[in-house]
Amino acid sequence: MSHLHTTALKATKVNHLKQLHAQLFQHSLYFDNYWVAQLINLCTRLHAPPTYVRQVFESVHQPNVFVFTNILKFYSQLGSHTDVLYLFDKMHKCNVTPDAFVYPILIKASGKWGVVFHARCIKMGHDWDRFIRNALIDMYGKFGPLEIARELFDEIPERAVADWNAMISGYWNWGNEVEARGLFDLMDEKSVVTWTAMVTGYSRKKDLENARKYFDQMPERSVVSWNAMMSGYAQNGCAEEVIRLFNEMMSCGVRPDETTWVTVISSCSSHGDASLAEGLVKMINEKGVRLNCFAKTALLDMYAKCGNLAMARKIFDELGTYKNLVTWNAMISAYARVGDLASARELFYTMSEKNVISWNSIIAGYAQNGQSKVAIDLFKDMIAKDVLPDEVTMVSVISACGHLGALEFGNWAVKFLEKHQIKLSIPGYNALIFMYSKCGNMKDAEKVFQSMEARDVISYNTLIAGFAAYGNAIESVELLWKMKKENIEPDRITYIGVLTACSHGGLLEEGQRIFDSIKDPDSDHYACMVDLLGRNGKLDEAKCLIGSMAMRPHAGVYGSLLHASRVHKRIDLGEFAANKLFEIEPENSGNYVLLSNIYASARRWEDVDRVRGLMTIGGVKKTTGWSWIEHEGKMHKFIVGDRSHERSADIYRVLSETEKKIRQAGYMADKSCVLKDVEEEEMEEMVGTHSEKLAVAFALLVTEPHYVIRVVKNLRICRDCHTAIKIISKSEGREIIVRDNNRFHCFSEGQCSCKDYW
């Protein structure tokens, strides 16, 4: 048997392990408890695949305490605490009595429920064991009560360094710097672990200065010490410091371990620097480093964030049975990040096991790529499968509700937050402000903003943008001054929001002052200024401003001029702006449609046909206009002349009745909104069945008289619908809020918040 023992001692690779396994077959020792225990021990040391280890374990018909102890150690090292507890239950059913060596593993695996095993240890007389006592101090230090950890610590007659370390770590876990430092100072002998605990503790408090002080004072450092300091920098977003410290570590001759590589690779990943990533990979290859599944997952994530999805997928496929949840989630996030939702979803549904991060990755992918309805549907699936969402999930879902204008479901999501006590940080509150703003509920948006204990620039920008969309210019300007008082520096987005608000609110002088105060205005700021001048009829000044720009104007600048030309019927400037836009974005149908509108208003049908001809030659297709409305948790979508809805007959009946009412109130169809030279009657019919009118008719059909009607439209509302809905709001006594792709139109008592300029 001596050569088998020699083979076991020399094993350094999984292949060596399999060779020993084969020799055990040859010597008919495959079912022997002693050798199976040795094999599992080797599997733990060499990080063998879990499926292989489980097969080795299950080859024994009657495993003894040593086999059970080693398989428990394997899953404990793997972090698979569920498997540890399952196997302990199996051990109990097999009538195998655990010895003292098993309990530290069980206590670690049980988390806060380790107190159950504490009671069992007392009953079995194992509570005197120093390893068990150390595990208990560690457990109470992590999960509390901390006082029990201290009692156990104080009862130890001869404390080992490991006991001091566990207690110091316990104090750091609960943020008690004073006690942690007090115990550290009392220690006669400090190990590397002791010093490292101080580095880790201060890093958690984001006190990197003190963390580095203890790190620099260490009499000796292990790779774990270097890892702790690098992790501190990484967790606090100091990627450059991580790379610098890693290079220092290498120059000191300290060999990186798997944790080092995970930390360094992850820092390169967050840095998003492709050349830095390439240099790191080159170093790994030159040194012949064998990365474990965690490091390879970090490498996968790094490639993905640096834009090399092919290499990320290659690593993913090569991992084979070593893939874990983190690996799957990283690959799904990588696909979602670049908008490859088909690949992301395929992987998601291939996964045998999913956690909240898996759901977050796929939901966020759809939400961030403009597919809000799918994101919400996935969230509903998640709830149905009893997976409890976290703040990250809710931010994606609440934001998706905002994009859709789904206030009903958004309110349900808020109640879900409260019911499940999901605490929100600043991004969560920002998502709520966004949702309420986009759903036409500025009162609650402002209420959330005011309730925040701390705000960031995004909080302000989101509320400012909300007010801007309503034309509440004064409120937006006041927010700009308020954020400056709170020492929050406005960014380019802030100024875009405030200038847009000034434009929608008609504050020309205030907007001009704010524009002049921007140090380096960009094209977006100029676009806002052109829009502001255009609204006030100063189109020639707007054109001069464009000519004075230091940078090349983008489509938004000429788009603002084109819209102003339509409103003020300046065909000359409209043609100028449109021709520039045809060069910049030849595939944007909206520019052709706007120029057609200008010509149609002047009944220049030949020019309308010419623009249509340009669209045909260029292969440009007009974007289909749609409107949707939320009712009883469902989004109802309409297009012009739509008869596909299940209640279409009733909708058209209500539309006809409403039209009769508004005609009596003086409404006449605006036929200039039709871009064809057709008969008058046909023109009237075409504008009469626009998508927003159908949506309003549906709302009148299915909602109570006091209900606020909220419609979302993907294009700008046309003049005819705008006039009609103003009169409907008065004749029906309803508040109607239409969100088009430019702003909110709040119709009430025959008036609109946009004051007929949009």
Image (spheres, rainbow, N blue to C red):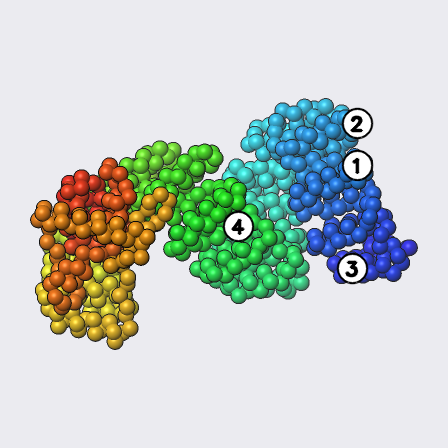
Residue 18 image label: 3
Residue 125 image label: 2
- Position in image of residue 641 (x %, y %): 24, 59
Q: Secondary structure at mark 1?
A: loop
| Foreground: disc 4 or disc 3 | 4
Q: Secondary structure at mark 4?
A: helix
- The kind of residue on which mark 2 rests is Gly
Mark 1 residue crowding within 10 angstroms, few (<14) / some (14–19) / many (20+): some
The residue that appears at 67% across and 32% down in the rendered structure is 114
Say which residue label 4 marks: 358
Mark 3 residue crowding within 10 angstroms, few (<14) / some (14–19) / many (20+): some
- Position in image of residue 344 (x %, y %): 50, 58
CA gap, disc 2 to disc 4?
44 Å
- The kind of residue on which mark 1 rests is Pro
**Would residue 545 be visible to someone looking at this image?**
no
Of the numbered discs 4 and 3, the one sitting upstream in the chain is: 3
Q: Is residue 120 left or right of residue 434?
A: right
Say which residue label 1 marks: 98
Of the numbered discs 1 and 3, the one sitting upstream in the chain is: 3
Of the numbered discs 1 and 2, the one sitting upstream in the chain is: 1
Q: Is residue 301 left or right of residue 631?
A: right
Of the numbered discs 4 and 1, the one sitting upstream in the chain is: 1
CA gap, disc 2 to disc 3?
40 Å
CA gap, disc 1 to disc 3?
29 Å
CA gap, disc 4 to disc 3?
34 Å
Of the numbered discs 2 and 4, the one sitting upstream in the chain is: 2
Q: Are marks 1 and 2 in contact (CB under 8 Å)?
A: no
| Foreground: disc 1 or disc 2 | 1
Q: Quadrant of residue 108?
A: top right
The residue that appears at 62% across and 27% down in the rendered structure is 146
